[in-house]
Amino acid sequence: MTHARRDGISDLTIETVDHDGVLVVTLNGDIDITNAGQVRTALEEQLNTHPVGIVVWLAVGFLASTGLSTLGEASRRAQQAGVGFAVVAAAHSARRSLLVAGMDSVLLVHESVPHAVEALRTAAVAERTDLAH
């Protein structure tokens, strides 16, 4: 269920924390057509900082198809920029949305932020090692 504010836009807060080069973007609330643009803009801004990786923590109660599309687009852009990208979907509703849409075959999906951060950090180190040889 979407909880709308008076202005008709679903409640969503976006917070970013830097974990030594891996940015964790926490999305809390609901993601639907009324605020998917906010998510897109926030992820683009973080990509423009050229981090080691971006972890999107879906702490959401509702994830509409526009949110799924936004995540897929951000993942593609991150890959093109050489930035690791992962999603954390510990909440049942977010994980279910990802699985039903088949996004788990497109996105790296983890069950916790520490696992996702470590996976992106390890992948970045491995890539640098490969480039050095």
Image (spheres, rainbow, N blue to C red):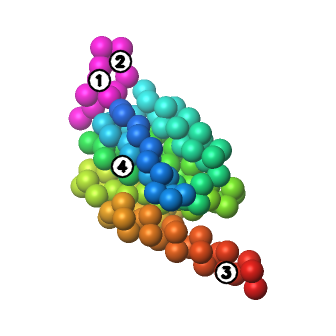
Residues packed near mark 3 inside 10 Å, few (<14), some (14 to 19) or many (20 plus)? few
The CA span between labels 4 and 1 is 18 Å
Residue 58, labelled with which disc? 4
Tell me the residue that label 3 is attached to.
129
Residue 61 sits above or below residue 56 on the image = above
**Left or right side of 64 for 44:** right
Of the residues tagged 4 and 1, which is closer to the observer? 4
Residue 8, labelled with which disc? 2
Q: Which residues are magenta?
A: 1-11
Residue contact between numbered discs 4 and 1, judged by CB atoms under 8 Å? no
Name the residue type under label 2. Answer: Gly
Q: Which residue lies at the image location 36% right of the left edge and 49% below the top edge? A: 58
- Going from the N terminus, do you reach mark 2 or mark 3 first? 2
For label 4, the SS is strand
Residue 17, labelled with which disc? none
Name the residue type under label 3. Answer: Thr
Residue 85 picture location, percent across and down = 53, 59
